[in-house]
Image: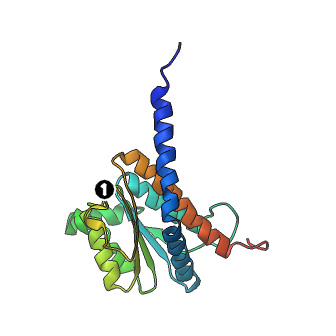
Amino acid sequence: MATDSEWIRDGIAASAAMIGGLAESADVIGEMGETIVSALEAGGKVLTAGNGGSAAEALHMSEEFVGRFRNNRRSLAAVSLVADPTAITCIGNDFGFDEIFSRQVEGLGKAGDVLVVFSTSGSARNLSRALAAARDAGMVTMAILGRDGGPLAGAADHEIIVPGDATERIQEAHQVIVHLLLDAAERAFWSDDAV
């Protein structure tokens, strides 16, 4: 049975174009990678957060730091603020959904740590409050956003905005950014005698 696969080709082409556009942000991605490496070298950690599909990006980033990206090397300190359902439901119940990340930042973050938030729309209030809590704690903040950046545009020390209207294409580009940031850390911490 023949299938009309034109929509598949269109989806692949749209994804490739979105990812190809990241080349314009190569310097920013490089700076973010260097900042993360510096924080980890100084004994800091990376905290990550996002909602929905962006929560999956946050989880993926932190687990690759703690585990490994491509090569064996020492474990790197990272915690995803979306990983603990008991903390999220406790905070959400007692303080409201807008505080689920900021309360964790207050408890876990310290000066010199890095907070990385992911949002395809840039409109999540819980991420805005997390960024504010991170600034108060003396942390470095990073936002990986989509569309026009929404209200979160300009709220972090470092940001990348992936323009476009298709959430799935933005998420695909965010995945590439995650892998490039992980690659930066791997290049800094991997050696031939690594674990």
Looking at this view, is 14 or 96 the one in front?
A: 14
Kindly identify which residue carries mark 1: 121
Looking at this view, is 191 or 100 the one in front?
A: 191
Pinpoint residue 160: horizontal percent, then vertical percent.
Answer: 42, 65
Pinpoint residue 178: horizontal percent, then vertical percent.
Answer: 51, 61
Pinpoint residue 78: horizontal percent, then vertical percent.
Answer: 50, 71
Tell me: 153 left or right of 181.
left
Looking at this view, is 116 or 176 the one in front?
A: 176
Quadrant of the rendered image containing residue 104: bottom left
Direction front: furthest residue: 24
Looking at this view, is 89 or 122 the one in front?
A: 122
Q: Image point 50% across, 39% down: which residue?
A: 13
Q: How is the image coloured?
A: rainbow
Callout 1 crowding tier (Cα within 10 Å): few <14, some 14–19, many ≥20: many
Q: Image point 35% across, 85% down: which residue?
A: 137
Taking the image as drawn, is residue 175 in sight?
Answer: yes
Quadrant where the C terminus sits is bottom right
Direction top: furthest residue: 1
Pinpoint residue 181: horizontal percent, then vertical percent.
Answer: 55, 66
Q: Secondary structure at mark 1?
A: loop
Name above or below for residue 87 compared with residue 1: below
Tell me: 39 left or right of 54.
right
Q: Image point 31% across, 58% down: which residue?
A: 148
Taking the image as drawn, is residue 100 in sight?
Answer: no
Direction right: furthest residue: 192
Q: Image point 52% across, 52% down: which residue?
A: 20
Tell me: 161 left or right of 97.
right
Quadrant of the rendered image containing residue 166: top left
Name above or below for residue 195 compared with residue 6: below
Name above or below for residue 48 compared with residue 43: above
Q: How many marks?
A: 1
Q: In the rendered structure, which amino acid carries the disc numbered 1?
A: Ser
